[in-house]
Amino acid sequence: MNRILPSDIRYGVAPAPDQTDVAEAAKVGKPQPNATQPDTGPPSATRPTATAPSKTQPGATRPGTESAGTISRSDNAVAIVSDLIARGTMPRIDTTPLLTHKDLPGPLSMARLTHFGTLHSLDQTNAYSAEHADTLYGRAMIALKLIPFGTIACALTAAWVWLGGTFPRTVDVISSSHYRADSHGRKIRVFNRKTAPEHVIQVGNLRITTPMRTACDIALLTPGELNEHDACDVLCALFEEYQVSLAQCMQTLDDNHFWPNTQPARELFTSMKHFF
């Protein structure tokens, strides 16, 4: 007796009858397995078969086998992202700058993509796209997803948008509200300071402090919030990249003398005069 292998089965087509089975069934008067019954109807009539016609088009993939094992066999970060996009599991990288572990097929996927440099992790379950982080507008899209609605990105978060680099440990915003919950693995640090309209600019849909105001906010940070060496590095980069002048910063501090920590900020700017 011949065995019907799984590879012999086609969707919507009955397997050919085994001739030995047909002969043995005929001897004992049993119905012949899968044998074609005499057609007593008109020539134009077609007797319905038990198996429904196949809906699979030529070249189509069998149901349930579209992407079996694709992710587990992939050893390339680019291939993983391409597979996810093709399957619709992950939003396209040009529209979604932030990802969580729920957007990926397994717990090790984020660590793997971070290792290959496709993502930059915020914590074990949140990350942002390295492609977005390479451009000003892309970083603005990332920051927009991180800051609470109605707030203004400022201080170190604003500096990251303007300059790039490693994302800071906190999400800095100007607001009159307080936020206890983290945002994608980062604590929200609120600065309730007077903000003139000319100190705010919009990059895409993100409201963010100008480079000059960002420099002032960084100079106003206490040593516990940012050490002087790191503050000088960020300030120098802002001054060089966006042509911010020390005179403008000093004037802004004079116009807002009620801000906390203004005197140390003036001293910091004064110590940098010989560089600019």
Image (cartoon, rainbow, N blue to C red):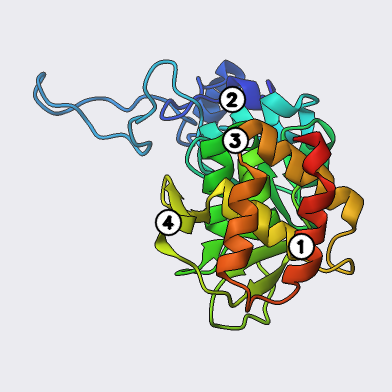
| Front position among marks 1 and 4 | 1
State the CA–CA distance, disc 2 to disc 4.
90 Å
> What residue is pinned by disc 2?
21
Q: Residues within 10 Å of mark 1 (few under 14, many from 20)?
A: many
164 relative position to 207: left or right: right
Residue 89 lies, in percent from the top left, at 56, 44
Disc on the earlier residue, 1 or 3: 3
Quadrant, the C terminus: top right
State the CA–CA distance, disc 3 to disc 4.
16 Å
- Whether pointer 1 and pointer 3 mark residues with C-beta atoms closer than 8 Å, the reply is no
State the CA–CA distance, disc 1 to disc 3.
20 Å
| Front position among marks 1 and 2 | 1
State the CA–CA distance, disc 1 to disc 4.
21 Å
Give above or below for 55 relative to 226. above
| Kind of residue sitting beneath label 1 | Ala
Report which quarter residue 56 is drawn in: top left
> What residue is pinned by disc 4?
198
Q: Residues within 10 Å of mark 4 (few under 14, many from 20)?
A: few
Specify the label residue 242 is tagged with. 3
> What residue is pinned by disc 1?
265
Q: Residues within 10 Å of mark 3 (few under 14, many from 20)?
A: few
| Kind of residue sitting beneath label 3 | Tyr
